[in-house]
Image: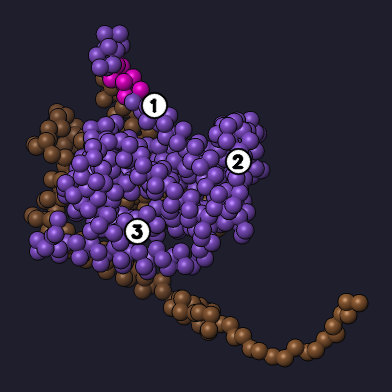
Chain colours: A brown, B purple
Amino acid sequence: MSFENFSFYLFAAVLIGAALSVIFSRNPVHAALSLVLAFFTAAGIWLMLEAEFLAISLILVYVGAVMVLFLFVVMMLDINLNRMREGYWNYLLPALVVSGIFLTELIILIGGRVAFSKPEKVPAAITSEGNTLQLGRLLYTEYLYAFELAAVILLVAIVAAIALTLRRRKDMKLVSSNEQFSANRESRLKIISMPSEGGRREDPS
Amino acid sequence: MIIEFLTPYLGDQLAYFSWTLIKVLAILIPVTLCVAYLTLAERKVIGFIQLRLGPNRVGPKGLLQPFADVLKLLTKEIIIPNGANKFLFVVAPMLSLMPALAAWAVMPFADGLVLSNIDAGLLYVLAITSMGVYGVIVAGWASNSKYALIGAMRSGAQIVAYEIAMGFALVCVLMMSGSLNLTTIVDTQRTGLGLLGWNLIPLFPMFVVYFISGVAETNRAPFDVAEGESEIVAGFHVEYSGTTFAVFFLAEYANMILIAALTSLMFLGGWLSPIPGIPDGFGWLAAKVAFMLFFFLWFRATFPRYRYDQIMRLGWKVFIPVTIVWLVLIGVLMRMDWWPW
C-alpha cells in the first residue's frame, strides 16, 4: 500500500468516525468538536485531490469561523440532556422516513455512477499554476455575475439576521463612545479656589 | 545533499520523510529557543522600563532564567479539577500550540529558504492561525470553571472580530503583490528603492491595523481581557498548572513571534535590506522580527488594559471600515494606473 493510499484510508476512517460521533455523542460540545474534526479531515482528503483552494477555504471558513461561533453558542446554552432525549420514539418514525428518502435520492444521484463505472483517475492539473489562481481568475471573469449574486444574497442574509436580532432595551445605560472620547479635563474636573477654614496651627515650640 | 545520502539506506519515501523531519526540527528548535529567550527579553525589557533590573540571578546576567522556568514548570503537578472534562482539558493546550507551530511550514526565511513553498501560502497561514482560538475556547469550557469560561468567551469574541480586519489587511497585501505565495510577496517589494519599495509605505494604515489586530489575536496586553487577572483571575488558563500551563505559555509566545514574522514579511520586506546596495539576507528578517517583537513588550509595559466594549468597538467599528476603505482605494489606484511605484 502506497503512502497515498494509506493516508486516504486513514483520513476516511477518521472522517467517518468523527461524523458518527457528531450524531451519537450525548454532549453537544463534543458533537461540535467532532464536526470540527470531520471538516479538518475532509480538508485533508481534498488536499490529496490537489484541490488546495477548496481545502484551505474549508478550514478557513468552517473551522476558523463558523464552528467557532457554533461552539460559542452551544457552550452558552444551558442544555438539559434528559429533556432533549424525551420523545425519542415519537421522533424516530418521521426521522427514518426523511432519512430514507434522502438516502434513496443520494443513491440515485451518486450511487449508480460509482457502482457501474470504473473508478476514474483524478485528471491532472492543466497548467502548472495553482488552482487558487485559476479559480480566482474564473470567479472574477467568467462567473462574475453568479459570484456577485451570491455576495448580494449573503449581504441580504446578514442584514436580515441583524434586523431580526436587533432589539434595543429602553433602560440601557449606554454612553455614546464619542461622548467618552471627547471628555477632557475641563469637562470633568473643576478646580475652585476657596479659603482654608483656618484650622489650628501646631505650634512648633 | 543529505537526502541523496539517506536514500540508499532508507528507500525513497522514508528518506524524503526523514529529510523533511530534519528540516521541520531545524525550524522548530530555533523557534522554541526564541520563545524561551523572548520570555527573558520580556521580563528584562519591562524591568528596564520600570527601572528594575529584571531577572539576573540564574546564570550570567540571568541568561539561564528561561531554562530554570521550564524545569520548574515541568516538575510541577498537573492538577485536573473535579468535574472537568479530562480529555479536552489535556487536549486544549495542544490545540493552541499546534497552529502556532504549523504556520511556520510556509514561512520563508530567505530567498528559497522555506520548508514548503506553496502557492496558497498566505491562505494557509490565515487558515492555520484561525484555528488557534479552539485551544482557548476548549480550555475554558473543559475546565468547568466560571472564570475560565468567561475568559474563553471574551477571547473567542475578540479573536473572531479581529480576524476579519486582519484578513482584509492581508487582502490589500496580496493585491499589491498579485500572489498568495509568501516568497513572491517579499520579492515584489524589491524595487531597488530599499525601504521606500516596501508595502509599509503604500499600505501604512493596513500595517497598523494588521499589527494591532495581531496583538489582539495573541491576547497580549492591552487586549488581554481573556486573562484579565484583576477581574477573572487568569481567564481561560486559571485551572492549568505544570506542563499544561507551560504549553499555553509556549503557544502565546510562539504566536507573538509568528505575528512579528508575518508582519515583517508582508509589510517590512522580509529579508530585503532597507538601503539599496547593502546585501539582503536572513539577518534583516531576524532584525525586523526582533524590532516588531519589541513593540509587543513595549505595549505591555505602556498601555492599561482596554475596556471590553472598547475592544469590540475598535475591532468592528474602526478597523473593519478602515480596511475596506483602503482596499477600495488601492483597487482604484491600481486600476487607474496612478501608481507611483
> What amino acid is found at the position of numbered circle 2 in the picture?
Pro
- Does the magenta portion include B229? no
Tell me if mark 3 has few (under 14), some (14-19) or many (20+) residues whose alpha carbon lies within 10 angstroms of its own.
some
**Which residue is at the front of the view, B73 or A193?**
A193
- Does the magenta portion include B18? yes
**Which residue is at the front of the view, B303 or B279?**
B279
Question: In 3D space, how far apart are the residues under numbered discs 1 and 2 (Cα atoms)?
Answer: 29 Å
Q: Secondary structure at mark 2?
A: loop
Residue annotated with mark 3: B208
Left or right, residue A144 beside residue A171: left
Direction right: furthest residue: A205
> What amino acid is found at the position of numbered circle 3 in the picture?
Val
Please determine if labels 1 and 3 lie on a single subunit. Answer: yes
Q: Which residues are magenta?
A: B13-22
Say which label, 1 or 3, has the lower sequence index.
Answer: 1
What's the residue at 29%, 12% (across, down)? B6
Residue B26 lies, in percent from the top left, at 37, 27
Image quarter (top left, top right, bottom left or bottom right) of the C terminus of chain B: bottom left
Question: In front of the other: label 2 or label 3?
Answer: 2
Please determine if labels 2 and 3 lie on a single subunit. Answer: yes
Left or right, residue B305 beside residue B101: right
Please determine if labels 1 and 2 lie on a single subunit. Answer: yes
Question: In front of the other: label 1 or label 2?
Answer: 2
What's the residue at 46%, 79% (across, down)? A182
Residue annotated with mark 1: B25
Residue annotated with mark 2: B55
